[in-house]
Structure formats: C-alpha cells, structure tokens
Amino acid sequence: MMRKIFLLICLFTVFSCKKKDNPNPPEQVRLLFPEKNSECTTGVDQDATTSRVSFSWQRADNTDSYELRVTNLNTNTVQTISTSATSSSLPLLKGQPYSWLVRSRNNQVNNTISSEVWSFYNAGSRTTFAPFPAEILTPDMSEKVFKDINNEVTLSWSASDLDNDIENIEVYFSEQNPPQNLEATLSATATSLKVSVLSSTTYYWSVVTRDLEGNATNSGVYVFSVL
C-alpha cells in the first residue's frame, strides 16, 4: 500500500512540475501590394496632392497583430498603423517614393520580426522618376566578414528605376562615417565591386544611383567589420 502511495506521489510530482511549452515567436510575412519597385496606380484620390493607398500581405503564423510601417524616401517621414488584418491603407503624397514593411507581433512573446523592405512610387503627376535607393545586398548591416586571398571584400547591391534611365552608380567607401571617398563610378548595370581591406578594421560604404534626368538617390550608409 505504501509503495502505491509513493508511486502516485511521484507521478503527481512529474506531471505537476512539467513545464508548459514556450510560445512560438511570430513568423515573417510576405508582402503582396504595392509591388516591389513599382508605380502604385490604385490609390484613391483624397485631394489634389494626396491619395489613400492600400497595402496587403500574407498572413503569418503565430502572429496576433501586424504593424505597417511606410516611409517617405524624400522626407524620411514615417507613418505606422497596427492591425490584426492582412491589409490596411494610409494617405500618401502623390508622386513621391516610399518604402514599406510589416512587423509581426505575438502577444505572448516580446520579440517581433520584420518583413522585407519594398519600395514604390505613389502615382501622381510626375512624368519622370528618380531612381529607387539602391538595395544593399552584401555585406549586410554590421556584418563581420573575412577578406579573400587577395585581401578584398565584395560589395554588392541592386539598383532600379521606373524610367530605366540609370546613368551610373557611385560607390563611396572609407573607414570614416559617412564615407567620403568615391571608390568607383560604375555603369548602370554594375551590381558589385571588390574593395581592398585590412583585418580588424571597420568600414562604411554607400551607393549613389544617378539617372539621365540628373536625379540621384543614396542607399544610406552601411557598415561592416573585417575579421
């Protein structure tokens, strides 16, 4: 009898002390509209200068709500809105370039995860468009990298323009922030450049995209360290 009681106590202790499973973190959403590097033409006119643009994305697992974040690339003005749906809309200035992303949130965990960042132009009266800011591919922001056998690191990016009239690509690279040294002026189709580096050194770089209309956009400054 005592042995049975002892076994019951042990079983009760095991089940009562079993930890609950930790909640899963939210997953990354996939953006749908406005499409990447496009001219958004479906905004609803609000007045002569503003239209309301709809945004949509796919539902993400383990997610209770989403934060839509839209940035005017000319003014760096940011608009945000939270929703439990997979779409929302915001009033945006016509003829302006924007970037947007969506953050996934789970009420049971503190961490969030952001989607990719897409850029687009809100349709307006413009007949020509400045290039989109170049998208930096590698090295990623604050990445630690190894130099190759030639003591070089490859910088890579992606540039696009609705008018398809990019004239050239300027790459700025130095140990100072912001980088002041013009490392190279490249053709419109260039997507990478090898640069000489030293071990245990931090470097800053940016890409300026220029078009035939005289417009120019800057990728913003990226930083990486060489091990």
Image (cartoon, grey):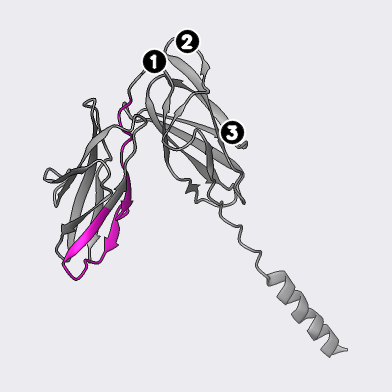
Q: How far apart are marks 1 and 2 (CA)?
A: 13 Å
N-terminal label among 1 and 2? 2
* Residue located 23% across and 28% down the image: 212
Is residue 30 part of the magenta span, yes or no? no
Q: How far apart are marks 3 and 2 (CA)?
A: 23 Å
Disc 1 packing (10 Å; few <14; some 14–19; many ≥20): few
Disc 2 packing (10 Å; few <14; some 14–19; many ≥20): few
- Where residue 81 sits: x, y (%)? 51, 31
Q: Distance between the residues labelled 3 and 1?
A: 26 Å
Circle nearer the viewer, 1 or 2: 1
Is residue 151 part of the magenta span, yes or no? yes
The residue pinned by badge 3 equals: 87
The residue pinned by badge 2 equals: 47
Secondary structure category for the residue under label 3: strand
The answer to whether 202 is drawn above or below residue 227 in the figure is above
Secondary structure category for the residue under label 2: loop
Give the magenta-colored segment's residue range.
129-155
Amino acid at dot 2: Asp
* Residue located 21% across and 48% down the image: 205
In the rendered image, the quadrant that contains the C terminus is bottom left
198 and 12: which one is in front? 198
